[in-house]
Amino acid sequence: MKLKPIWMFIICCITPFILAYAAIQTNWLPDNTTNKGRLLSNDIQVPNWQVNDNTLWSIALSAPVDCGLVCIQQNQRLQNVYQALGKKQDKVSLVIFGEAKNNDMTQYPALPELQAGWLYLVDHHGLVVLAYPYEESEQKSRVLHKGLLSDLKKLLNYARSS
């Protein structure tokens, strides 16, 4: 009679491990994520990152010298995304990586790991987290920037709750 509780205890302890092992072996875990941007697989840290105390995230445009019309279009679209943030603008800053002239944005040297003309989300420690590619089509670009805005709002809401 005393062995029955011990066996029940052992079964209750081992069952979760068996189920977890089976889930991993059968690829039962979901492959999709809720973010709209591309999560960067390698860590890219911005050297000499300085940010305002209340700024949680930064939207960065990679604009090296040879960027041209792509960067001009992305800069205009970026300003629209920033305006769409509304009252959350004070938690987000705009940054440009490269030599492009823009007085409204904080400038940093170009990073060779970043694609020219792409937008990136950078956290307040200077870690580049999500990437948003350049789309020539206005319609595809609009969808991409709505995704950027959605991701940014989720991140800001998460930061507020923690």
Image (tube, grey):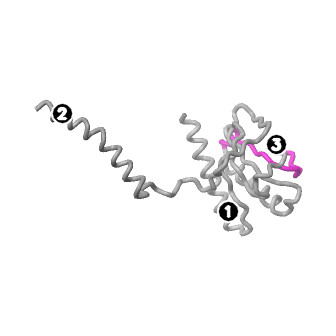
Give the residue displayed 76% in from the left and 52% down from the top. 113
- Position of the N terminus, as image quadrant, is top left
Residue bearing the label numbered 2? 5
Contact flag, marks 2 and 1 (Cβ < 8 Å): no
Q: Secondary structure at mark 2?
A: helix
What kind of residue is marked 1? Arg
Give the residue displayed 60% in from the left and 56% down from the top. 36
Q: Secondary structure at mark 3?
A: strand
Residues in magenta?
A: 87-106
Would you say residue 79 is visible in this rendering? Answer: no
Neighbour tally class for label 1: few under 14, some 14-19, many 20 plus, Cα within 10 Å: some
Give the residue displayed 84% in from the left and 63% down from the top. 69
Q: Could you tell whether 41 is left or right of 103 in the image?
A: left
Residue bearing the label numbered 1? 142
**Measured Cα–Cα span from mark 3 to mark 2:** 65 Å
Give the residue displayed 83% in from the left and 45% down from the top. 104
Residue bearing the label numbered 3? 106
Looking at this view, name the residue that lies furthest to the front.
3
Residue 42: x %, y % from top left: 66, 49
Going from N to C along the chain, the mark reached first, 1 or 3, is 3
